[in-house]
Image: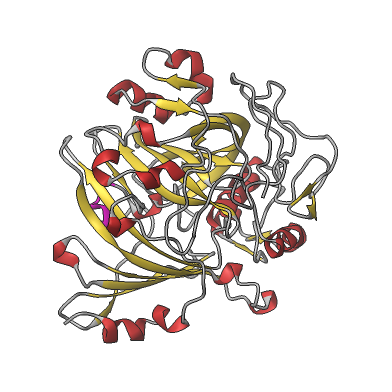
Amino acid sequence: MKRREFGFLTGSSAMGWVMGGQGARANGTPGLGPGLTAFGSEIAGNKAGTIPAYTGGLTGIPDGMTWDPTKTLPPDFFAQDKMLYQVDADNMAQYAHLLSDGLQELIKKTGFEVRVYPTRRTAAYPQFVLDNIAKNITRAKLDPQGGRLGFSGGFCGIPFPIPDISDPYNAGVQLVYNHETRWAGTYVHNNTGSFVVQGGRAPALASAGPSNFYFPYYDPNMDPQNYDGLLYKVQNVSTGPATTIGDEFVQWYYINSLQTPVKTWQVLAGQGRVRRAPDVQYDTPSSYVDGVANYDEYNGFNGAANEYDWKLLGKRGMLIPYNNNKIYSARVEQIFTPKFPNPDYIRWELHRCWVVEATLHPGERNVMARRRLYIDEDIWQIGIIDTWDANGVPYHHNFSVNANFPNLPGTLYQDNYVFNLQTGDYCNMQGNFADAAYARPWIFKPVSQSVFDPQTIAATAAY
């Protein structure tokens, strides 16, 4: 393919609402309205030229590059880009309007640096996803008893590509559901590792192993009329640390996880007995990262939305991690420094983000009393989420990194890093690195449904 030209300019600017303009085509499908792509983002760039117009995304390997997706993780397709500027403790005030509160806290407390590169709008979707996004405009509905309780009708695409901005609370929770149902393929097989850094010590392996994912929500062979609300199934076998080798779990996750809670089955090595796992939602500390982060912090946020009232605050240009394939070239020892992941391997870009604030609904509880989410308009992934405790003190800062898979196509979530701003500890949730154990390619081919059957895992477990 020929490389798509984006026409970058240096500098930065905050963005407000930018609608209007002429309709255009994205991935072969007409936009959803004047000035909108087929997946709901704004086609136009910003006035300063620091955010380019959308021109189709990354759907092939750029000229001069080679890559066999069956053998390796994708390379850094934009390694030739030069850094535009760096944000650190000395110049942070100059760029404060582009930084979340939690990111500013992280910079001040640890010396973290943000390396900013030209913005590349690489989002891309298969045609069947774009077709269904258009259909979801009329068929996806929030729960009539309250949007935080769930939604129905969406299938095979973002359910609310044009949020109802006339009601900030409806729009806020719609954006959360867009994030939770973002495009991630129909089948994915990968091999990841999660590490924790506590007290400035060397990174400790918290969990690792191969996983199989199946997303019925994105299965074009399913009949949407008979879709039962199952968002994904995942099966994982533990390869570390040593005390967990051979453990296995299967999880079924639903789009309305309040009405249909997450179902998790696990078998421990040497026991051969399948058990239903306890609650793996909300603010339960995750055993897969030694409790440094909670289950509802995976992917930025995941799980039932009922604990919060979600309010759309607007849309603005923000610095978020983007096009982070470079991480795949780093070994674990290179990434995890005593206070933060190595800034040399994290690419930041200026993107328009929907800003959503979550406050606890009366009568609900969560250790995160308030959250603020920054959701990228193109891939619908939370780029950054900040949280505060019940005393209003900054608690966790959480940023997500994504990677380009033009063979799918898509720019997909690959990992997130969670920082406890009060203790200085941090972790990643499920990453790939250059070490052989975590460098296996992502495979998007179907696997047998039997691997997601809880009755199967006991037969395959180690005794």
Residue depicted at 72% across the width and 23% down the height: 47
Image position, residue 412 (x, y; %): 52, 52
User: Image quarter for residue 150?
Assistant: bottom right
Task: Write the residue at 20% across / 44% down.
Answer: 203
Q: Position of residue 160 (x, y in %)?
A: 67, 53
Q: Position of residue 183 (x, y in %)?
A: 58, 57
Q: Is residue 208 above or below residue 266?
A: above
Q: Is residue 293 magenta?
A: no
Query: Is residue 133 in view from this perspective?
Result: yes
Q: Position of residue 419 (x, y in %)?
A: 32, 38
What residue appears at the point 40 percent right and 80 percent down from the top-left corner?
451
Question: As drawn, which residue projects farthest toward the right?
Answer: 22
- Magenta-colored stretch includes residue 290: yes
119 w.r.t. 258: above or below: above
Q: Nearer the viewer, residue 401 or 406?
A: 406
Q: Is residue 361 visible?
A: no
> To which quarter of the image does residue 206 belong?
bottom left
In the image, taking residue 377 as reference, residue 452 lies left or right, namely left
Q: Give the quarter of the figure containing the C terminus.
A: bottom left
Side (left or right) of 256 relative to 441:
right
Q: Nearer the viewer, residue 360 or 28?
A: 28
- Residue 457 sits above or below residue 377 on the image: below
Magenta part of the chain = 287-292
Task: Looking at this view, name the residue that lies furthest to the front.
Answer: 64
